[in-house]
Image: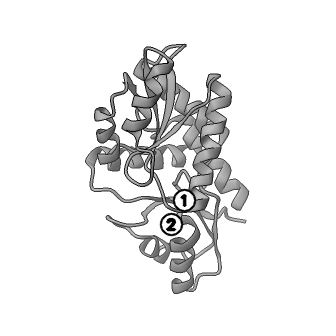
Amino acid sequence: MTAPALVLLAHGTNDEAGWATIERLHAAVGHALPEVDVRLGYAGVVGPSLADVLADLPGRVVVVPAFLASGFHVRVDVPEQLAAIGREDVAVAEPLGPDPELISALLDRLAEAGSRPGDTVVLAAAGSTDPVAQEDLRTAAALLTARVGHEVPVGYIAGGEPRVASVVASTAVRGPRVVLATWLLAPGAFHRWLADAGASVVAEPLGDHPDVVSVVVERYRAAA
């Protein structure tokens, strides 16, 4: 039996670096699954849309949402799009986060950015008003807490409170340096804004880290 196709569904962006990062992730997933037809679609902003991609895939398909939490796109938008298309041969996998492998990727990104033992880590996330997404973020923070040895507070970049800069300011009393673990998949405006949050170190987004690729593959296989 032919393996189902995989549609990696990302949050669209007009940012050139963000787009290039998602393209690299797409290519890496295709390299990890050479026997699978791996396509890339976007939930908004740019194309191709999920409907556009599915129109070229008449057989079984697994959609892997490239999101770090089960927010609006995962629980509402994608199911509504599939219902409108009328496809019953499409399975939707779990989103990428929260997942212990992504915490390993976070720590690698922090180390690459210059974080040192003894630094106080803050988890910087885009933010969401969705309670399920907020719970996923708390889970990610708890997983990171278990790895770094101190409680990791969460700061929101754009949606919700507390904002990252406020968390950095209130956390600085713990030690000489506060570093930001970036809970974003790709660079863009949100990541650039973190430069003004007052932290000593700002990690790069997770991007096409091998652990991210591994989680995509795991989500695909579980749903397939």
The secondary structure type at the circle numbered 2 is: helix
Disc number placed over residue 65 in the picture, else none: 1
Indicate the amino acid at tag 1: Pro
Q: Nearer the N terminus, badge 1 or badge 2?
A: 1
Residue mark closest to the camera, 1 vs 2: 2
Indicate the amino acid at tag 2: His
Say if 139 sits above or below 174 in the image: below
Dot 2: within a 10 Å radius of its alpha carbon, few (fewer than 14), some, or many (20 or more) residues? Answer: some
Q: Is residue 178 left or right of residue 212?
A: left
> Would you identify the image quadrant in which residue 89 lies?
bottom right
Residue 216 visible in the shown view:
no
For the residues labelled 1 and 2, say whether their Cβ atoms are less than 8 Å apart. yes
Residue 178 or residue 65, whichever sits in front: 178
Q: Position of residue 118 (x, y in %)?
A: 54, 14
User: What residue would you read off at disc 2?
Assistant: 73
Q: Is residue 209 left or right of residue 20?
A: right
Say if 10 sits above or below 197 in the image: below
Q: Is residue 140 left or right of residue 158?
A: right
> Would you identify the image quadrant in which residue 60 lies?
bottom right
Q: Position of residue 144 (x, y in %)?
A: 61, 33
Q: Position of residue 189 (x, y in %)?
A: 29, 47
Q: The C terminus lies in which quarter of the figure?
A: bottom right
Residue 42 or residue 136, whichever sits in front: 136
Residue 59 visible in the shown view:
yes
Q: CA distance from mark 1 to mark 2?
A: 8 Å
Residue drawn where x is 33% and y is 34% of the image: 197
